[in-house]
Image (spheres, rainbow, N blue to C red):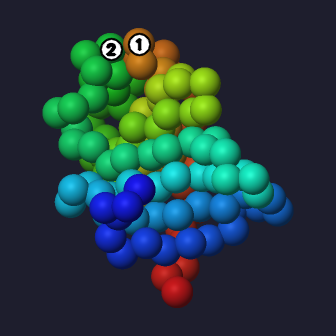
Amino acid sequence: FPAAQKVKWSVEKPGEFEAEYKLNGVESSVLLDAKGNILETEEEIKEGELPQGVKASIAKDFAGYKLDEIEKATDAKGTITFEMEASKGKDKLEISFDSNGKLMGKKPLKEEKED
């Protein structure tokens, strides 16, 4: 990723390293193993870029929720998932969908402390 700007490295867990960066103005990240193999890439996208199936699931199951931090994640096998934060009042969730709009995960969002 030679054109990446503002690269910030962190250790996700032992043997996995994440580089967060901006590429062509888009917030992105790549997760690598200790050998440098790409495990996952993520790029921030706009709500309008979500596939129709994902939009339909959100409209049906998360009506009234405000979406934030929307990311398109691609694993080493090329499987794409869409991950985002959803909030409605004090209810804050992290939700993820497959490309067809099937809910893959839903968990309460924990507040992260800023460094």
Residue 6 is situated, as x and y percent measured from the top left of the image, at 36, 75
The residue lying at 40 percent from left, 37 percent from top is 72
Residue 107 makes an appearance in the image: no
Mark 2 is on which residue type? Gly
Give the CA separation, mark 1 to mark 2.
5 Å
Crowd band around label 1 with a 10 angstrom C-alpha radius: few (<14), some (14–19), many (20+) = some
Residue reaching furthest right?
Answer: 14
Please give the residue where the numbered disc 1 appears in the rendered image. 100
Image: 88 above or below 72: below
**Judging from the image, what secondary structure is the residue with disc 1 in?**
loop
Locate residue 27, reporting x and y percent: 33, 58
Circles 1 and 2: CB atoms closer than 8 Å: yes
Is 56 on the left or on the right of 80, as rendered? Answer: left
Instruction: Classify 84 as above or below 3.
Output: above
Judge from the rendering whether residue 75 lies leftward or rightward of residue 51; answer left or right.
right
Q: Position of residue 61 (x, y in %)?
A: 39, 24
Residue at the far front in the pictured view: 2
**Residue type (three-letter) at the residue carrying disc 1:** Asn
Which quarter of the figure has residue 86? top left
Residue in the foreground of this view, choosing between 107 and 51: 51
Please indicate, yes or no, whether residue 50 appears anywhere in the rendered image: yes
According to the image, label 2 marks what residue? Answer: 53
Dot 2 lies on which element? helix
Label 2: few (<14), some or many (≥20) within 10 Å? some
Q: Looking at the figure, which quarter contains the N terminus?
A: bottom left
Residue plotted at (45% across, 46% down): 42
Residue furthest to the left in view is: 48
Q: How many marks?
A: 2
